[in-house]
């Protein structure tokens, strides 16, 4: 699978990003933290556990063998799988988290439908992503061929994500945003604001509404 290949091939390069752009990572983490509720949660596309571990999320789904191995070493119970076909029973979790994952799935609508299925009634879906219309989103798209990860990515705008979530049966939306500059210029943890349209990193949280 082409979108998984770079994560298995360049795990060290993936991890290095979080060290090199430490304050950008911490800013994103703070935005996600504001959206994550209490309860039993799972991260889809858990990667190396960079978000799940500090947020005390103990379950993850990950297609990359090498990423899954790193996450397991951090105490996360990881099952191999993809977002479109989650190997999880109905009504299993209070919340589902995606962080910079939706750009790598093959079918975002199917991924949201699967999340809806495994959530308990009124469970939450939380999605952190780079808005394609933001300065950073535009830069990543323009230079995608230079990046072994983003060359396979499909970026979305906040409005597109919102529309797909509504069609899937989610409602009661909240938005948070951060990363108001390019990562190499960020030298401290940035403010997290409600709403979207300013920050490049957006977090959308929504509730499972009975269809």
Image (cartoon, rainbow, N blue to C red):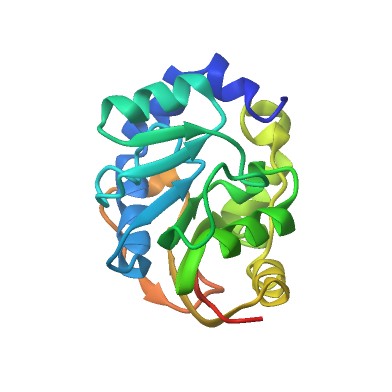
Q: Nearer the viewer, residue 169 or 149?
A: 169
**Residue 203 seen anywhere in this rendered image of the structure:** no
Tell me which corner region of the image, top left, top right, bottom left or bottom right, holds residue 78: top left
Q: Is residue 15 visible?
A: yes
- Where residue 9 sits in the image (x, y, percent)? 56, 14
**x%, y% of residue 62?**
51, 34
| Residue at the bottom extreme of this rendering | 172
* Extreme-top residue of the structure: 9
Name the residue located 42 percent from the left edge and 60 percent from the top edge.
Answer: 93
Q: Quadrant of the C terminus?
A: bottom right
Res 72 → quadrant: top left
The answer to whether residue 5 is left or right of residue 15 is right
Q: Is residue 176 left or right of residue 143?
A: left
Residue 150: percent from left, percent from top: 65, 36
Give the number of marks.
Answer: 0
At 61% across and 30% down in the image, what residue appears?
A: 149
Quadrant of the rendered image containing residue 87: top right
Residue in the foreground of this view, choosing between 176 and 49: 49
In terms of depth relative to the viewer, which is nearer, 15 or 51? 51
Location of the N terminus (image quadrant) = top right
12 displayed left or right of 64: left
Q: Is residue 154 above or below residue 8?
A: below
Instruction: Find residue 122 and report its horizontal and vertical position in percent.
Output: 47, 78
The correct choice, above or below, for 182 with respect to 207 in the image is above
- The residue sitting at 31% across, 36% down in the picture is 76
């Amino acid at each position: 699978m082409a979108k998984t290949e770079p994560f298995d091939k360049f795990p060290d390069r993936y991890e290095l990003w979080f060290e090199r752009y430490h304050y950008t990572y911490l800013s994103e983490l703070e935005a996600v933290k504001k959206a994550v509720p209490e309860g039993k949660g799972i991260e889809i596309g858990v990667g190396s556990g960079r978000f799940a571990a500090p947020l005390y999320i103990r379950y993850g789904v990950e297609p990359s063998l090498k990423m899954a191995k790193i996450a397991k070493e951090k105490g996360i119970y990881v099952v191999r799988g993809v977002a479109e076909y989650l190997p999880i029973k109905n009504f299993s979790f209070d919340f589902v988290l995606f962080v910079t994952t939706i750009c790598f799935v093959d079918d975002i609508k199917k991924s949201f439908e699967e999340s809806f299925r495994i959530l308990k009634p009124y469970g939450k879906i939380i999605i952190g992503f780079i808005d394609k219309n933001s300065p950073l989103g535009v830069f990543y798209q323009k230079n995608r061929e230079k990046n072994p990860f983003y060359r396979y990515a499909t970026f979305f705008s906040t409005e597109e994500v919102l529309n797909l979530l509504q069609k899937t049966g989610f409602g009661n939306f909240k938005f948070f945003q951060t990363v108001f500059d390019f990562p190499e210029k960020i030298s401290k943890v940035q403010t997290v604001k409600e709403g979207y349209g300013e920050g490049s990193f957006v977090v959308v949280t929504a509730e499972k509404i009975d269809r």
